[in-house]
Image (cartoon, rainbow, N blue to C red):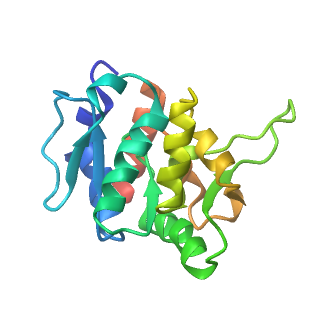
């Protein structure tokens, strides 16, 4: 696509701004995690940027999640949606559905969408479209990072996340990511009809 995903323009705004704006409509606090010195587009008012620790830069999505979750714990937040900059199809209905599981059932520590089995029998777990309870997610992520884990999926496994079928979500495409030029064009077309 020729440039960092955060800077891609869709519907008159950068992809990062779009995702932060959608999250801000339903979450009282939005945190964007970046690498130190990483250039990002202007964030919407009220969105907080935090940087990964220098010694862990490039160490994977679990480290980024730990950085953001730790900041949210410091701010007194008790649940969090974990998203990604390339979530062009993200909707407030999806975020509300994920957070709603945690607010209605206090025994659930995490929730994550899971696709139906693929032809090979595996399932796709959409780790950048789920939600976690704090501070237990911070403590679990910290232990996982210290043990050498880097995949975000490990956090949801460590929290024994409730798996929710993608097809049962209010907007199943909300778990899609924008990884190819074809995805980008599909996102552009969708956003034109869903500002």
Please count the marks in the image: 0
Q: Nearer the viewer, residue 139 or 169?
A: 139
Q: Residue at x 59, y 45 (%)?
A: 155
In the rendered view, would you say 104 is above or below 92? below
Image coordinates for residue 149, horizontal then vertical, percent:
58, 30
When the figure is inspected, residue 3 is found, relative to residue 158, above or below; the finding is above
Q: Quadrant of the C terminus?
A: bottom left
Front residue of 167 and 130: 130
Q: Is residue 178 visible?
A: no
Residue 29: percent from left, percent from top: 29, 65
Q: Quadrant of residue 27?
A: bottom left
The x, y position of residue 156, in whole percent, is: 63, 49
Q: Please, is residue 28 above or below residue 185 in the view?
A: below
Q: Is residue 59 left or right of residue 113?
A: left
Pick the front one: 62 or 25: 62
Tell which residue pokes out farthest to the top in this image.
2
Tell me the quadrant of the picture where the N terminus can be found. top left
Place of residue 134 in the rendered image (x, y in percent of width and height, measured from the top left): 47, 63
Residue 5 appears in the figure: yes
Q: Answer left or right for 162 relative to 23.
A: right
Horizontal side, residue 129 vs residue 42: left or right: right
Quadrant housing residue 154? top right
Query: Residue placed at 29% from the left, 18% from the top?
Result: 2
- Name the residue rendered at 16%, 56% in the picture: 44
- For image coordinates 42% across by 50% down, the residue present is 190
């Amino acid at each position: 696509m020729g440039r960092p995903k955060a800077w891609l323009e869709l519907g008159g705004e950068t992809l990062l701004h779009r995702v932060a704006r959608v999250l801000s409509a339903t979450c009282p606090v939005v945190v964007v995690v970046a690498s130190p010195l990483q250039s990002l587009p202007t964030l919407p008012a009220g969105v907080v940027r935090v940087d990964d620790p220098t010694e862990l830069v490039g160490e994977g999505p679990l480290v980024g999640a730990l950085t953001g979750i730790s900041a949210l714990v410091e701010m007194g937040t008790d649940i969090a949606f974990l998203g990604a900059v390339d979530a062009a199809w993200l909707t407030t209905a999806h975020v509300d559905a994920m957070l709603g599981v945690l607010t209605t059932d206090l025994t659930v520590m995490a929730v994550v969408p899971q696709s139906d089995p693929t032809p090979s029998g595996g399932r796709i777990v959409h780790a950048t479209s789920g939600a976690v309870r704090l501070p237990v997610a911070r403590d679990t992520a910290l232990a996982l990072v210290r043990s050498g884990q880097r995949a975000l999926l490990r956090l949801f496994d460590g929290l024994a996340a409730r798996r929710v079928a993608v097809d049962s979500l209010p907007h199943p495409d909300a778990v899609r990511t924008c990884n190819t030029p074809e995805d980008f064009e599909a996102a552009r077309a969708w956003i034109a009809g869903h500002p």
